[in-house]
Image: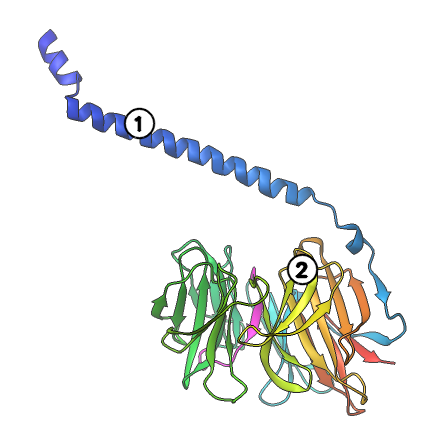
Amino acid sequence: MLQACTSANIPSVNNRYTLAAVVVAAAVVIVCGIFLVYRSLTFFLPLRKLSTPSELRTPKVILGQGLFSKSLYYQDPSLGVITDIEKGADGQLVLVGQSGAVVLNPNLQPASIAHYPKCMSDVAFVNLSTGTFLCRGSWVSDIALFNRDGQLVWRYGAKTPGIDDAVAGQIEGSETVIVGLNGDGGLHRLDPQGKELWQQPDGNVWHVEIAVPDSGTGAMILHSNARGQLISRDGAGNVVRQDKPEIYVSHFALTAWDDHPTRNDLITPGDGSLYILTMHAQTLAKLSAPGTAGVDEVEGTSVRLSALAMSYAALVRHSMWKRSVLYIYDKQQRLIYQEVLDHDCGALFARANSSGNEDLLLGCDGSVWKYSQN
């Protein structure tokens, strides 16, 4: 009996090694789990306790008081934060929020309205045969396409460390959705039905756009990556150009610049300034923007506020503190207006007015504000 119990309960040498390996692996998993929980607590809890920075605490016009008149253009809290303002094919204005979208008649009455589940990232107005509103996705949100009635068409969740961004458009005559992933997830292309067509490797594809060169033909995939580069790719995902800007580029937005109407230049923050870059990373302007250190999300647009010259407006978003900062520059790139807003704002749009010039529309949390030059 003793011999039987001994032979049954004492593992062989090989089994002992296997058992030891299992114990060590389990210990590593437990230690790593404790470490990750600790890092999460030490990272995220302080963020929740951070107070609003002093320069953002008080909403006010810092520079340029009296230059512009400000009025409420449209309001609907059910839309959530407005992250895109575009002109529809029929000339109507489309306001797109994180929770819904509205198409406005010229008299600012809704021609149609759609609601969808809140997107934990920007939502863009897109021109796909299958859908109209694209939730661009994030680490905590899948990419989702909704039709004009707000009904879900498809949802795409990556099986990699996380989604950084997505964009929809046309490349080489075909409708497409391009997805940028974190870590080594690279770049994915989807068809209009949300089916994956290909993958291309890259690291930390922070932001992705589809941009048309000055020639007006040959739309390219344009994205940033872990090295802070700007990468241009064709429809198959092949790298056409790799350009290194003078600053590290992560998030950026397409913008029109100066008198050039095409939105194929970039605005991106860096070193407490806002940089305007070409598609190929050449610096066109470095705009003074006090209080932008550490900022990621920016938007910008050229706007003809008066008949004298084109101005430029830039929006910096501080969603953590429900604050945004609006900057307006004159033709000589001088900062002439700066305002801290007690709103989370995510969209800029230049809207033609009855005088033949343009008003600046600012999309915020359930509201759109209009700025006109006095």
- On screen, residue 63 versus residue 45, left or right, reads right
Q: Do we see residue 76 in this rendering?
A: no
List x then y, in percent, for residue 79: 65, 68
Name the foreground residue: 124 vs 309.
309
Tell me if residue 262 comes above or below residue 114 in the rendering.
Answer: below
According to the picture, the residue beneath numbered tag 2 turns out to be: 271
* Residue type pointed to by label 2: Asp
Q: In which quarter of the image is the N terminus?
A: top left
- On screen, residue 29 versus residue 211, left or right, reads left
Q: Which residue is drawn at 69% across and 56% down?
A: 293
Kindly indicate the quadrant of the structure image that contains residue 50. top right
List x then y, in percent, for residue 367: 72, 69
- On screen, residue 59 versus residue 40, left or right, reads right
Mark seen at residue 343: none
The majority secondary structure of the magenta stretch comes to loop
Circle 2 residues within 10 Å: few <14, some 14–19, many ≥20: some
Residue 213 lies in magenta, yes or no? no
Q: Do we see residue 90 in this rendering?
A: yes
Q: Which residue is drawn at 52% across and 89% down?
A: 216
List x then y, in percent, for residue 118: 57, 62
Q: Do the residues labelled 1 and 2 touch (CB within 8 Å)?
A: no
Q: Quadrant of the C terminus?
A: bottom right
According to the picture, the residue beneath numbered tag 1 turns out to be: 23
Kindly indicate the quadrant of the structure image that contains residue 115. bottom right
Q: Give the range drawn in magenta.
A: 118-130
Name the foreground residue: 205 vs 91.
205
Q: Is mark 2 on a helix, strand or loop?
A: loop
* Residue type pointed to by label 1: Val
